[in-house]
Each structure stands twice: as structure tokens, then as C-alpha cells.
Amino acid sequence: QVQLVESGGGLVQAGGSLTLSCVASGRTFSSYNMGWFRQAPGKEREFVAGISPGSTRRNYADSVKGRFTISRDNARNTLYLQMTSLKPEDTADYYCARSRSVLSSTRMEYDYWGQGTQVTVST
């Protein structure tokens, strides 16, 4: 069983920065593609960013490209999402997730999810 625990969310003013962390249990973290998703109130959960096991490939949603950076530390079983130039529309619950196989932006490809951490961006 894999457990993913996010942290680092909070309240920040527009233009500010936050870094989210996700710690994974187990010994296989380094073997899997990982991703960040977010869900705003009343909206569907959407892909934010994904990263391959060795960090050689990363992809981003168009809405965050150039502002967010996904990274990982396999020695610490930790996934990160550095968020800069935050906008009110970035307000959401942010979830990390483990992919079953491929590096994908599709929710159905991910089988383990964290409980989420809330990010609120004020004007």
C-alpha cells in the first residue's frame, strides 16, 4: 500500500510563491511517474504537472507553464511543486498522485492519491 501525504499549502497574495511537498511511503517511489493535480470548488480535478522517475521528462498544463516547476528527490521519496507568480485562479486543493505506468495528464492513469493540501490565492 502506498501513502502520499501533501503539505505546504496555505494562503498567499497574488504574485506570491508557495512550494508544495508530497512524501510517499514505500520503497518504489523512484520507479514511478508522478503528478500533481488540482481541484477548485465546483470544478473537475485537473492535471497540473507530471514528472518521470529520473526527472528527465516533465510536462505541464498550459495554465501553469512558466510559473510552476515540478521536481522530485528520490532519496527522500518526495515530490515537489514550486509555484510562483500565483494567481487567484490557482486557488484549489492540490493533490499528488502516482501513475500506474505512463507519464500522463489523464486522471485515470493515476492509482494512488494523497489527501490534498489547500492553496488560496487572494487578490
Image: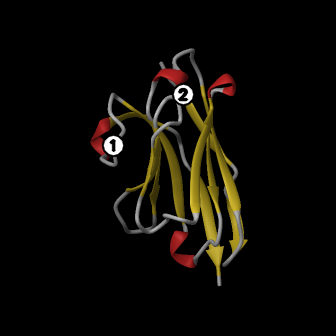
Q: Secondary structure at mark 2?
A: loop
Q: State the residue in front, 57 or 103.
A: 57
Q: Tag 1 or tag 2, which sits nearer the N-term? A: 2
| 47 vs 107: above or below | below
Place of residue 100 in the rendered image (x, y in percent of width and height, measured from the top left) = 34, 28
Residue located 46% across and 66% down the image: 40
Residue located 58% across and 76% down the image: 87
| 121 vs 39: above or below | below
Place of residue 79 in the rendered image (x, y in percent of width and height, measured from the top left) = 60, 38
Q: Which mark is residue 3?
A: 2
In the rendered view, does 25 fall on the left or right side of 65?
right
Residue located 34% across and 48% down the image: 105
Place of residue 120 in the rendered image (x, y in percent of width and height, measured from the top left) = 62, 69
Distance of mark 2 from mark 1, alpha carbons?
A: 20 Å
Q: Quadrant of residue 30?
A: top right
| 36 vs 1: above or below | below
Q: Residue furthest bottom?
A: 123
Q: What residue is shown with label 1?
A: 104
